[in-house]
Image (cartoon, grey):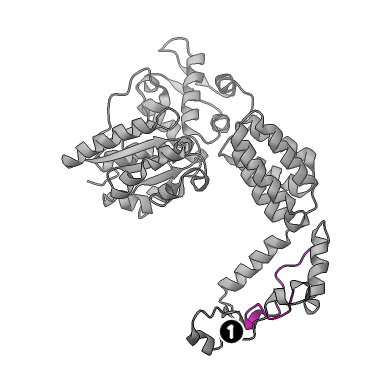
Amino acid sequence: MDLFEGTAPETGVREEAPLAERVRPRTLAGFVGQEQLLGDGKPLRVLIERGRVPSMILWGPPGSGKTTLARLIAHHTDADFFQLSAVTAGVKDVRTVLDRAHIARTRGRRTMLFIDEIHRFNKAQQDALLHSVEEGLVTLVGATTENPSFEVIPPLLSRCRVYVLQPLDARHLQTILDQSLKTDPWLSGRSVTVEDCSRLFLLSGGDARRMLNGLETAIRLSEHAPADPVTVGRAAFDAAFQQKQTRYDDGGEEHYNIISAFIKSVRGSDPDAAVYWMARMLDGGEDPKFIARRMIILASEDIGNADPYGITLATTTFTAVDYVGMPEARIVLALCATYLAAAPKSNAAYVAITEALEDARQGADTTVPLHLRNAPTGLLKGLGYGNEYKYAHDYPGHVVPQQYLPDDLTEKRYYRPTDNGRERDIRERLNRWWPEKKR
């Protein structure tokens, strides 16, 4: 029997459960989306087929299938499944699951621990998992909507594989909608016509759970008697979602459009536009730390040495946002965004590292000149390591011209300071020190 087909669905879902829970797929054959992970020959599918599923972090937007996928992996690998929410669970709850995992192992059973919103676990809670994950007592599956590189402690992250789930597109949502109308007992017993599916998908923001529960609400608002045909469309969807338009679909296309508009407004030195797009993100429920992280990157890439205080302010802003939280964090974010927007701009550092990386990847000569090499032993000194090196602090101004680049790259100029802000002073200083490298 194919792993992705033929196993009987699990039962026991309550009739009063939301539609998204009632139609949650019970086999991988019914799972929609994430073909990059579960398609034929794709990494996660192969691991499941071989019964060698590692601990992992599922990173993706809401409604992309993280919880469903975790349950299906446990089912198909015949593992005992425990689910905790990082919002309400603590170290005690984790240890209770680990105690049960010890008992299960003596019986030859495997245990999967699924932690929803694992980014909300603090360091101590994440530390409590390390030993058990490392020794394989439990297979940890953590779900997060946040970048695990920032939210999961490095020791735990190094013991897990990170799988990125993509937002569901209209094709995926249509398939889920069609399946739900056919398989849910409450829906399949009614004559339901769904008009303006694009409106439903737009309001859902790529979140399948939000789409299904919104659909159910729209139908319940529209129906009169079980035997009556029901037609739901734009008006019913707007009423069900209690909004006239998608303000900010976190994780969907509009999410990327608005953060792009914000970054480009700061880069373009328009503080008014920057504050507006930031307000759109905050009003839509965006994590303020996401915005703060983007400003750290922006300060490095687009402002750089034209105003080196920019990255200091951006980094401090991230810390302050983490300390105070919303709603006060909005003031800190606005302070930083307006400063960065009004600051002089330079992408010279960004251009420099981009060009240097390109040379490195193209196989440029990276042999270190002899006078720059370390000579910790007499043998290496005898080979000329470190000979004729000039110690900068022994020279006027603590600067001494000598060759620092490899032989084949001596004519390269990666860093070309602009005429903006403090970078003008940097350019003039470098030109005094290196007149042959006029920038």
**At label 1, which amino acid type do we have?**
Leu
Q: Is residue 334 magenta?
A: no
Percent position (x, y) of residue 169?
51, 41
Looking at the figure, which quarter contains the C terminus? bottom right
As displayed, is residue 437 above or below residue 317? below
Which residue is depicted at the point 34% across and 22% down? 185
Give left or right: position of 48 versus 60: left
Residue under circle 1?
Answer: 370
Percent position (x, y) of residue 402?
70, 81
Which residues are drawn in magenta?
399-417
Percent position (x, y) of residue 404?
66, 77
- Marker count (numbered): 1
Percent position (x, y) of residue 381?
53, 86
* Quarter assignment of residue 187: top left
Mark 1: few/some/many CA within 10 Å (<14, 14-19, 20+): some
Q: Nearer the viewer, residue 243 or 277?
A: 277
Give left or right: position of 389 versus 223: right
Which residue is depicted at the point 72% across and 73% down? 413
Q: Is residue 293 visible in the rendered structure shown here?
A: yes
